[in-house]
Amino acid sequence: MNRGYHEIKEHGKREFPFNIYPCSIPVDFSHVALHWHEEMEIIAVKKGKGRITVDTVSYPVEEGDILAVFPGQLHAISCGNGERMEYENIIFRLSMLMGDNGDGCTVHFLKPLQEGQAKNPVLIQRNQPDHEVFGKVIQELDRFSEIRGNGYQLAVKGQLFLFLYYAYGRGILFTEKKPGHAREKIKGILEYIREHFGEEITIRQAAELCFYSESHFMKYFKQYAGMPFIQYLNDYRLTRAGEYLKMTEENVTQIALKCGFENLSYFNRLFRRKFGVTPRQYREDQEAAAGVSGESSPLL
């Protein structure tokens, strides 16, 4: 799954776009690169600690903390050296809660969020007074999703409405008429990377897309992504290379070239640094694990 851009994976079923994924850093993946999607995402930290960045603001999180990311917000997840974090992703489309155009909840509360007008995420820390009610919602979502009894979808929707009710009750869901201009420029860069990652992409090209000087662009991109542009580009290319190794029979050289690496030695070195194994060993490991059942995380 490609995470370094506008995520387009369908979560859950089309008629019920809701799913819960258990995740672990660095066991499942080293980090989650900067990305955005049209779904709302609730991140509930189960163990350990890490950092979630949303629209340039970095939020340290630890066991028990809950953070809600709204549609269109750029976000990334990471841990420090020697740290690990287990968490669950609750991902759903707000449209599943919406009524017709005359519905008050849709017009006043859900539609502004769906259109990307949220200015900030919601962080509920475990030592805050209202943490218990948010935590109860997470527990109930887990319970109903596991049991999946007749009509469980109704219970899930009810809990999601409760979560949004409590979030609005905090008074921090301020919205703006249009998403921030800077955020939209970054989204454009991420889309460009997704569409052209196999081609030569330079800092100069990226800067010109934003109408910035190269120096200003490098500073601006790092502020959002938490890493330099070239590092982000290489990380995205390596992620795609890992997917091709897993899903195709193309040889390593073909995949390296397909992902924008003209120097095979450079590709092998970066790949091993990211995944801890050579490309060939990675493919063998993935083939050995192919029989494992269960739905994959959205972040692989």
Image (spheres, rainbow, N blue to C red):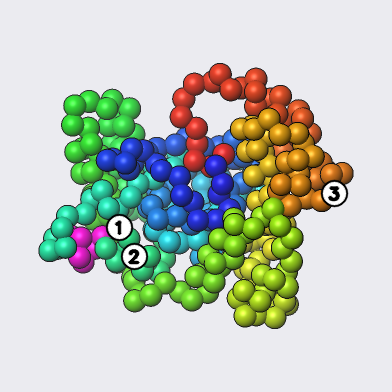
- Residue on which disc 2 sits: 115
> Is residue 293 positioned above or below 87 on the image?
above
Give the mark nearest the N terminus, 1 or 2: 2
Q: Nearer the viewer, mark 2 or mark 3?
A: 3
Residue shown at 20% from the left, 65% from the top: 107
* Disc 1/disc 2 C-alpha distance (Å): 17 Å
Do we see residue 172 in this rendering? no
On the image, numbered disc 3 is attached to which residue?
263
Local SS, label 3: loop
Q: In the rendering, at what x and y percent does residue 257 appear?
A: 76, 47
107 drawn magenta? yes
Q: Which residue is mark 1?
A: 167
Residue 189 visible, this angle: yes
Which quadrant of the structure image shows residue 254?
A: top right
Q: Is residue 106 magenta?
A: yes
Give the amino acid at mark 3. Asn
First to last magenta residue range: 105-110
10 Å crowding of disc 3: few (<14), some (14-19), many (20+): few
Give me the residue at 73% from left, 77% from top. 215
Quarter of the image for the N terminus: give it.
top right
Q: Nearer the viewer, residue 254 or 3?
A: 254
Chain-order first, disc 2 or disc 3: 2
**In front here: 240 or 130?**
240
